[in-house]
Amino acid sequence: MGTNGSTMLEPLRQGLPPIDPSAVSGSATCTLPARYEAVGGARQFTRATLNRWELSDRFDDVALVVSELVTNALRHALPADAPRDPQDPPVRLHLMRWTSRLVCAVRDPSEESPVAAEAADSAESGRGLFLVESFSDSWGWHLSPAPGAENLSAGVPALRGKVVWALFRLSGDA
């Protein structure tokens, strides 16, 4: 678990009303193994973090979204045959809180865009991003810069993976 999610916050602000940086109340991060059991661990981490932040009344909606984002990362972003760097866990869950907002963000190694597809009425899966959209106030994604890596020819950060995020307004946010 870590506490520095600030490097992720700038892209999340795009298209959102400005947030006073001094209003950041906290952030927490956990790494998740590339196993479906990690979804339960993500929910437990979310419950403990929201309890610590006195936001336990938001657990049901936030846990549903966290479960969907982590499941999508495990199902669609982690090819079974891809080599993995043991020092770089494949999926990370970040929870960031301001006075009036909570952001859940999941980082995975894929650079593929998440796609909300139509699921057949009888399908048992395929509705995750629709649930994320329904239970959060907004969601989106962006490519993730590789830590400390730069594209030398362009002088811009090299990319590695993506971050899919969901924003929840907390009471008092217009």
Image (spheres, rainbow, N blue to C red):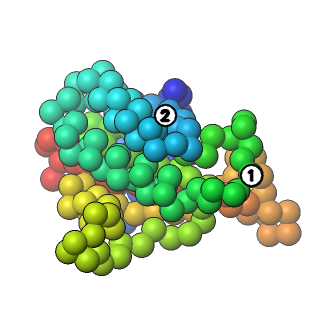
Q: Residue at x 80, y 63 (%)?
A: 151
Give how far across and how far down residue 43 sits, in percent.
Answer: 34, 35
Q: Residue furthest front?
A: 122
How crowded is the residue under tag 1: few (<14 C-alpha within 10 Å), some, or many (20+)?
few
Disc count in the image?
Answer: 2
Front-lying residue, 10 or 59: 59
- In the rendered view, tell whether residue 28 sits above or below residue 113: above
Give how far across and how far down residue 172 sits, in percent.
Answer: 14, 43
Does the image show residue 144?
no
Instruction: From the viewer's perspective, tell me whether residue 117 is left or right of residue 64.
Output: right
- In the rendered view, tell whether residue 50 sits above or below residue 135: above
Instruction: From the viewer's perspective, tell me whether residue 147 is left or right of residue 125.
Output: right
Say which amino acid is labelled 2: Thr
Give how far across and how far down residue 44 sits, in percent.
Answer: 35, 29
Give how far across and how far down residue 41 sits, in percent.
Answer: 41, 32
- In the rendered view, tell whether residue 74 sits above or below residue 59: below
Q: Residue at x 56, y 53 (%)?
A: 108
Front-lying residue, 108 or 50: 108
How crowded is the residue under tag 2: few (<14 C-alpha within 10 Å), some, or many (20+)?
many
The span from disc 2 to disc 1 (Cα, nearest Å) is 23 Å
Q: Residue at x 32, y 63 (%)?
A: 125
Say which amino acid is labelled 1: Pro
In this rendering, which labeled residue sits more in front, label 2 or label 1? Answer: 1
Identify the residue position indicated by label 2 in the image. 29
- In the rendered view, tell whether residue 68 sits above or below residue 62: below
Dot 1 lies on which element?
loop
Does the image show residue 65?
yes
Identify the residue position indicated by label 1 in the image. 83
Dot 2 lies on which element?
strand
Q: Residue at x 35, y 53 (%)?
A: 68
Q: Earlier in the sequence, mark 2 or mark 1?
A: 2
Front-lying residue, 166 or 12: 166
